[in-house]
Amino acid sequence: MVVSINYVKSTNLLIAILLLGGCVNNNKKMTNLEIVKSTYEGKDSEENGENIQKYLASNATWTEAKGFPYAGTYIGFEEIAENVFARLASEWIDYKFTPEDYVANDNKVIAYGTYTGAYKKTKKSFTARVVHLWKLKDGKIISFEQFVDSKPVINAMK
């Protein structure tokens, strides 16, 4: 009887180890490309924002292009949220970035596509081509830089 109890205990331990091993493999570290995609391709803008905050390094820099309405470099989530996302949410209708494709190489990910939206005060809509350059380190976003055709955005604001 002792042999069968030890056999059952050993079998249960082996099954537990195999199951836990499977769990570890299923929780693989996201690639830089997957992290960046998660900031655009969530089920809604709230999820995208949560993913930005989740993967953003505490001292990350966020640069909006010169000539763009929110031009400047902001450091950390608080500054980025206040100077970029809060303004986009309060000043625009359906402002969004639609990615066309991505290019990933080591610690850099490029997303390119189109901005669209309408300015609340003028009700004018726009379409502008844009490129985002993301830099990551150890699974965290350390910098973001925007390259955009600002003219259509400025025209929508006039």
Image: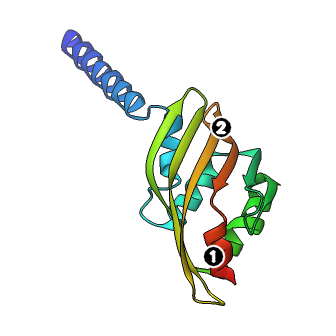
Kindly indicate the quadrant of the structure image that contains residue 69.
bottom right
The amino acid sitting under disc 2 is: Lys
Q: Return the x and y of residue 34 as percentages of the image width and height.
A: 47, 41
**Is residue 95 at all visible to an observer of this figure?**
no
Which quarter of the figure has residue 22? Answer: top left
**Residue pictured at 50% horizontal, 56% vertical:** 40
How many marks are shown on the rendered structure?
2
Residue found 78% across the figure and 52% down from its top: 76
- Give the percent coordinates (x, y) of residue 65: 73, 56
**Element class at badge 1:** helix
Q: From the image, which quarter does the C terminus lie in?
A: bottom right
**Location of residue 45 in the rendering, given as x and y in whole percent from the top left corner:** 52, 66
Q: Is residue 41 left or right of residue 119?
A: left
The residue indicated by pointer 2 is 135
State whether residue 76 is above or below residue 8. Answer: below
Q: Residue at x 81, y 53 (%)?
A: 73
Residue bearing mark 1: 89
Q: Can you say whether 96 is above or below 30 in the image?
A: below
As rendered, which of 29 and 143 lies closer to the eye?
143
Q: 112 or 18: which is nearer to us?
A: 112
First along the sequence among labels 2 and 1: 1
Does residue 25 appear to the left or right of 129 in the view shown? left
**Residue at 65% across, 77% down:** 155
Amino acid type, label 1: Ala
**Left/right of residue 126 with respect to residue 41 in the rendered view:** right
Q: Residues within 10 Å of mark 2 (few under 14, many from 20)?
A: many
Is residue 21 among the parts visible in the rendering? Answer: yes
Element assignment for label 2: strand
Label 1 CA crowd tier, 10 Å (few <14, some 14–19, many 20+): few
Residue 132 vertical position relative to residue 137 in the rendered view, above or below: below
Instruction: Decide if residue 146 is on the left or right side of residue 47.
Output: right
